[in-house]
Amino acid sequence: MLVAMRRLIITAVVSTVLVVTAAPAHAQQDLIESDPAVIRARAAVESAQAAAHAAAAALAKTSEELVATQAAIEEHAARVAELDRQQEELRIQRDALKADLRGRAISLYRSGGNPTIFEALSTRNAVLTARRKELSDIAARKTLDTARKLSEARDQLAKIRTTVHEEENALREQKAELDTLSARQVQQQGTLARRVATANTLLAQARAIGALRVAGEPVMGRSTLSAAQMAAWYNTQGFHPRLETSVAQLAQIYLDEGADENLRGDFAFAQAILETGGFAVAPANNFSGIGWCDTCSTGNQFPTPRDGVRAQVQLLVNYADAGSRAALLHHRVSQYLYGSDPVVAVRRFDTFYAKGWAPTWRDMGHGNWATDPNYANKVITIYRKMVTFSQGA
């Protein structure tokens, strides 16, 4: 009976949890979207998209102008060719008229023969000669007038041709400028496309961070910051590190070791900053206060920075993951934390008393890593400062 009642209670509790979990899905998304980092990232995306749209519109307009200019150039070239053809026809007609005029003069001269003095004195012949000369003069004047008009028309066409050709040259210069502008706009569009892609990446990162914040900042998972971003923020804080390696190299070690165990190495880095006062006090590569306590005189010692980071990461995995086992670790259990005997080290890791007690960073503190009740907020604050700095850089 008690078992049955217990099952009913458990079923009711589980059902309630499922309903509560499903109900606030939209509310959680609203919280993510209202996160300041998400709002800033979304504004950056919208700004980049607006610039990209403007660039695309400008490029489309330039392309249309290029098409229109090329069509005008081809039209002017065809017109110049037509004017050249018309000029050539007028020249041929004019030359034909001049040749005809010369032919008539020669014919008239020949038709007049070589009259004797008596024939020249003949009244009839004189009249014919005068009439022939008058008719020839009239025809010659008409021919000359036509030839003159043809020359004038040809000259006028030459002037028109010069104007059209100059317009064509101007259009070619305009097209060259448009080609240069188009190439520059294509390059700008590529730059803006990359800017949009970067902004989208930052937005996705910001949303991921927002989701993590809503979830209480899980200890496990992928890092969101790079070693360069973490080191860049660190270098602005005025810390005085005392390390065996550079801060940038140590940050990369945190990311590598965290990625190996599916743990957020950038958050572990933030924890180390808090524990060591910005790496000012990190004796024997102990970056997270392992082994130190309110009544302890010393803590664990690690021969290398990587050994110190690896021990910190493995201990965080034990706190965060109730299903963590030594056999599932990417690296062997740290001998400097769990013991030099491999068998004993594995047993100690697998039987860690607080396994799974702190799946999120908000669960740290209150004795789950430190006794300070504000411990979690301090670590989270450092991490968020790094994130904010990286998004503004």
Image (spheres, rainbow, N blue to C red):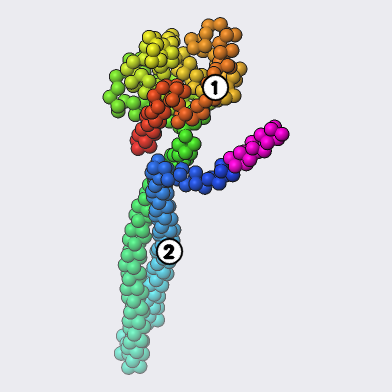
User: Counting other residues with Cα less than 10 Å from the Cα at mark 1, is it few (<14), some (14-19), or many (20 or more)?
Assistant: many
SS label for mark 1: loop
The image position of residue 282, as x and y in percent, is: 36, 15
Total labels: the figure holds: 2
Quadrant where the C terminus sits is top left
User: Counting other residues with Cα less than 10 Å from the Cα at mark 2, is it few (<14), some (14-19), or many (20 or more)?
Assistant: some
What amino acid type is highlighted by mark number 2? Glu
Circle 2 residue: 75
Q: Nearer the viewer, residue 240 or 380?
A: 380
1 and 2 marks in contact (CB < 8 Å): no
Judged by its main secondary structure, the magenta piece is helix
Circle 1 residue: 355
What amino acid type is highlighted by mark number 1? Lys
What residue appears at the point 33 percent right and 92 percent down from the top-left corner?
127
Is 367 located above or below residue 184 in the figure?
above
- Write down the region rendered in magenta: 1-18
What residue appears at the point 46 percent right and 18 percent down from the top-left corner?
312
Q: Is residue 111 magenta?
A: no
The image position of residue 277, as x and y in percent, is: 33, 21
What residue appears at the point 59 percent right and 24 percent down from the top-left corner?
323
Q: Is residue 370 left or right of residue 338?
A: left
Is 393 located above or below residue 154 in the figure?
above
Q: Nearer the viewer, residue 30 or 140?
A: 30
The image position of residue 71, as x and y in percent, is: 44, 61
Quadrant where the N terminus sits is top right
Q: Nearer the viewer, residue 294 or 30?
A: 294
Work out how far the residue at label 1 is from the one at label 2, CA to CA, in angstroms.
83 Å
SS label for mark 2: helix
The image position of residue 363, as x and y in percent, is: 47, 29
Q: Nearer the viewer, residue 240 or 186?
A: 240
